[in-house]
Amino acid sequence: MKALTGNRNWMFAIIGSACLVGAAVGMAQKDTSPDVPAAATVQELSNVFRDISRRAMPAIVSIETVSKTSQIADSKAMPFGDNSPFQDLFENDPRFKDMFKQFQNQQNQPRRRAPRKMGTGSGFIINKSGLVMTNSHVVNGADVVKVTLNDGRVFTASDIRMDPRSDVAVIKIDAPDLKALPMGDSSQMEIGDWVLAIGNPFGIGMSVTNGIISAKGRGPGINDREDYLQTDAAINPGNSGGPLLNLRGEVIGINTAISSRSGGYDGVGFAIPVNMARWVSGQLIDHGVVKRSFLGVGIQPISNELAQSFDIKVGQGAIITQVMEGSPAEAAGLQTGDIILNFANKDVSGPRNLQGIVEQLVVGKSYMMEVLRDGKRINKNLTMKEMPKSFSVAKDEKPLEGKKQEKQKTSVNELKIEVQPLTEELANQLGYSDHVKGVVITSVEPGSAAEEVGLMKGMIIEKIGTTEVSSMDQFNQGLKEAKGKDSVLLLVRNHSGARFVVVPTK
């Protein structure tokens, strides 16, 4: 089982499953008020769970994977084999003749093989032709993928197609008499809705657990593309790739990961929304790979502090922190500091929401975008391009070293930081590209508001308020314009990218 460490352990349900979450449903008293929702009786709810499980089980599969094997040479026998420098000595000296024969026989034995690495997971049939949907991490790196149907029949997958960015995979089996699960609409699921999770936890066999949708739009940092449904339906190792079903028996998610300190069910599970999985699987089936559109911008959500600075609502839109060269965003004239409010006739409520809108747009087609720039709403027309196969990996933050250039430092009392011009030599020393402009932070006063918001030595300040910064004079001018305000808005950059921060001054 994979684990991502941090304040909590985000543990992939690579062998994923579902534990039982008991749902206590009491007998509801009748209430004639139209404002009070009517509750089902225990038996009525039980009958629903029973019917969904009965209809779904034939379409759920267990997946077993075997990784590639490798040969290991017996290095101890090598010096005594044919053409060994000791061969004449051992063959002609009667004291060592028997020993030499023993080593020769040892070398002639077949080389030892590393033990095969086995894995298990779950999946579900999405088409009677034999298409099975599961998680990419369940089948990634497998040499052989075996699929066991609920009736006991076993088949070997003949085709495996994966998308690691979303952790969705589609595999093909050649089998008759298959039953497929119907797909639902994950966008219609709301917090509190009942769901069932089905899979093969710990390899013990098909199991059903129940729970509710606990949250939507989660992004715990497991994959590149995230917009998870969170559920308290028990998910354990072995459940990965199994379906999350609504009360109509439709798939609304793929059980993918758990937050766990114990390695098992702790009450927080994550499922890929089926709307995303349906689109990804369609791309995999049609093209073998997923073709995504992209904007070519760095973005961040609107926090409470940024909302006050830009005079918009918290969570409304996404703010641009960087525009990439040669991107659709640059071609359309988007700028750092623009707030994307609407794109392709869909309101934007944050980075993950915007990413979900963008990636499914048609490459080569143009779409209208509404942005907020300097307090004014403007429209931009963008023509989409296909996302490059890879992006540069962010570098670790490097400390400021070498000459301090004391005469160029400027003490900024309002922000409790010191800055200096970003020369070409200093940019190279810090590992930034030539096109980065601004002033570099050389010190931050301990315990200051600047330190609390995350400003660090070696960061670049590219903008202060609405003033672009490429020199000390521009930085001081921006600071002067912000004088008397309760806070100062900065656009700062490190090796992970650029972001806006608000530094309180009072």
Image (tube, rainbow, N blue to C red):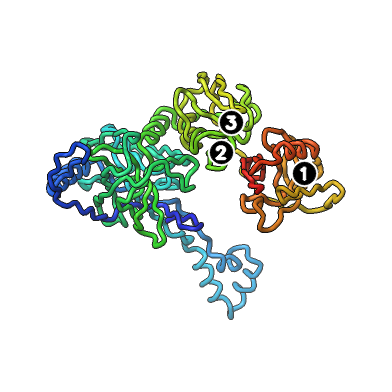
- Residue holding disc 2: 308
- Give the x, y percent position of residue 376: 58, 24
Give the residue drawn at x 42%, y 52%: 12
Residue 464 lies in what quarter of the image? top right
Residue 100 lies in what quarter of the image? bottom right
- Give the x, y percent position of residue 493: 67, 42
The answer to whether any part of residue 502 appears in the image is: yes
Q: As rendered, which of 414 and 286 lies closer to the eye?
A: 414
In this rendering, position of residue 120 left or right of residue 295? left
Q: Which quarter of the figure is the N terminus placed in?
A: bottom left
- Give the x, y percent position of residue 208: 24, 50
Q: Is residue 379 above or below residue 224?
A: above
Between circles 2 and 1, the one closer to the viewer is 2
In this rendering, position of residue 149 left or right of residue 119? left
Q: Is residue 195 above or below residue 294?
A: below
Numbered label attached to residue 383: none
Give the residue drawn at x 87%, y 48%: 407
- Residue holding disc 3: 296
Of callouts 2 and 1, the N-terminal one: 2
- Residue holding disc 1: 428
